[in-house]
Image (cartoon, coloured by chain):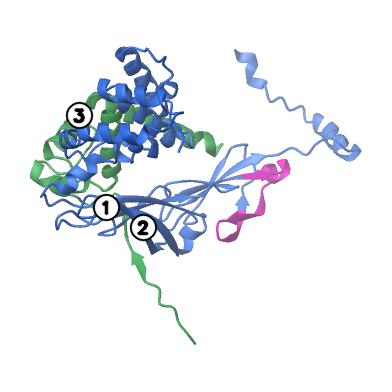
Chain colours: A green, B blue
Amino acid sequence: MKYNIIQVCHGKILDDENDLSLIQLCNICNLTPELIIEMVNEGILEPTGESKKAWRFSFTVVERVRKVQRLKNDLNVNLAGAALALHLLEKIEQLEIIIERR
Amino acid sequence: MDFKDYYKILGVKKNASADQIKKEYRKLARQYHPDVSKDADAEQKFKDIAEAYEVLKDPEKRKAYDEFGSNWKAGQQQQQKQSQYQQTRGTEYGSDAGFDFSGGFADAGRYSDFFESLFGGDQRRRSSARQAFRQKGEDVNATITIPLVVTYHGATRLISFEIPSILPDGQIVNKKVNLNVKIPKGIKNGQKIRLAGQGSPGYNGGNAGDMYIKIEIEKHPIFNFEGADIYLNLPIAPWEAALGSSVNVPTPTGTIKLKIPAGSSQGKILRVKGQGIPAKITGDMYVILNIVLPPASSDKARKVYEEMKELNFNPRANFGRY
């Protein structure tokens, strides 16, 4: 009997319970802390923790940060404009889920 | 390789001004940006649009493209034009493009063969490979689509993808990678799995990038889902709703008996605890009652409806108040 040994990769599910510090988030997104801080000030990201050192982000913000960067770069909007677009896109998504459920 | 008509892609005339080109680009970019558009081919369309703008916004590139375009059919000067352009512009273009890995879709993908034949390869990447920086490799994103039932049991899936890696001389090669990925039980639609270190190799001794696998749950013919909860539209007969009954209801993994309370109305939602996706916090199944009337197409059915008339039921009773 011949066995094929298959190597299986186990990943980590990224959900709201993963905690990222400001520096870790910067490394994952390849951005400077200043840009992330701006996004927090704009209300795009809402970390837990009082001081910047204690800030903790969930992994789901990585996609959010990237989306904001893409909107900024490709559509030439500023951060406030990207935040508005993001907010409206999320609203559309929620409404689409409600429509589908009917 | 096909000729790409950048003017046509942006919908502008050949003599369009820089302002017109910018305006049309912005308009199309808003429409087809992959973060905004739901079109299946939005990403390809947007890449074409971005590439067209990349060329037409730059007077020198536009001029080179115009000359190239008028000679396209002859096709002989192609090689010569290309090398000319690269000799004069190639290196400089690479150095100012620098290190922006935070970029958008416009510069995330590689340019078309057509673009590269005219302006040379992707100098942005090449230039960054030449820098003596230690840099983390790029992250690789992939999507796996699974049937709903897989999230109830978990599964292993083989995925194949190509990772661009940069050779020491700056050339880009695509390396084919096969990976068996464990899809954990209880994963929700849209969640991502992170495989640390499975992305592109790092530059100059930097760490490898990570691989992100987005899980998409296939649309199911009868179940909808949101987060860990699932929703089922349950058709029931009027007497089942009025008198109460016990009906067999499908779940993603089997069947359960569900008690319909007497006097249930159209649209009533019943919660079945713990039958949702077995995530960390197990979801519930919500059953939405949908009362279906039997058609009055037979004598017997007509007779029953006639008899019901005698109930003197007026569904519009409260209209009189307005």
User: Which residue is found at the position 19% from the left and 50% from the top?
Assistant: A20
Q: Which residue does the numbered mark 1 point to in the structure image?
A: A17
Residue B112 vs B66, above or below: the answer is below
Q: Which residue does the numbered mark 3 point to in the structure image?
A: A42
Q: Residues within 10 Å of mark 3 (few under 14, many from 20)?
A: few
Q: In which quarter of the image is residue B77?
A: top left
Question: Label 3 is placed on what type of residue?
Answer: Glu
Question: Label 1 is placed on what type of residue?
Answer: Glu
Q: Which residue does the numbered mark 2 point to in the structure image?
A: B280
From the viewer's side, name the closer residue of B79 and B178. B79
Mark pair 1, 3: CA separation: 23 Å
Left/right of residue B316 with respect to residue A90 in the rendered view: right
Q: Which chain carries label 2?
A: B
User: Which residue is found at the position 88% from the left and 36% from the top?
Assistant: B303
Q: How crowded is mark 2: few (under 14 residues within 10 Å), some or many (20 or more)?
A: few
Residue B186 vs B9, above or below: the answer is below
User: Which of disc 3 and disc 1 is earlier in sequence?
Assistant: 1
Question: Label 2 is placed on what type of residue?
Answer: Lys
Q: Where is residue B111 in the image (x, y as percent from the top left)?
A: 34, 38
Give yes or no for residue B256 being in the magenta stretch.
yes
Q: Residues within 10 Å of mark 1 (few under 14, many from 20)?
A: few
Left/right of residue B60 with respect to residue B286 in the rendered view: left
Q: Quadrant of the N terminus of chain B?
A: top left
* Magenta segment: B234-258
Mark pair 2, 3: CA separation: 31 Å
Furthest residue in direction right, as rendered: B299
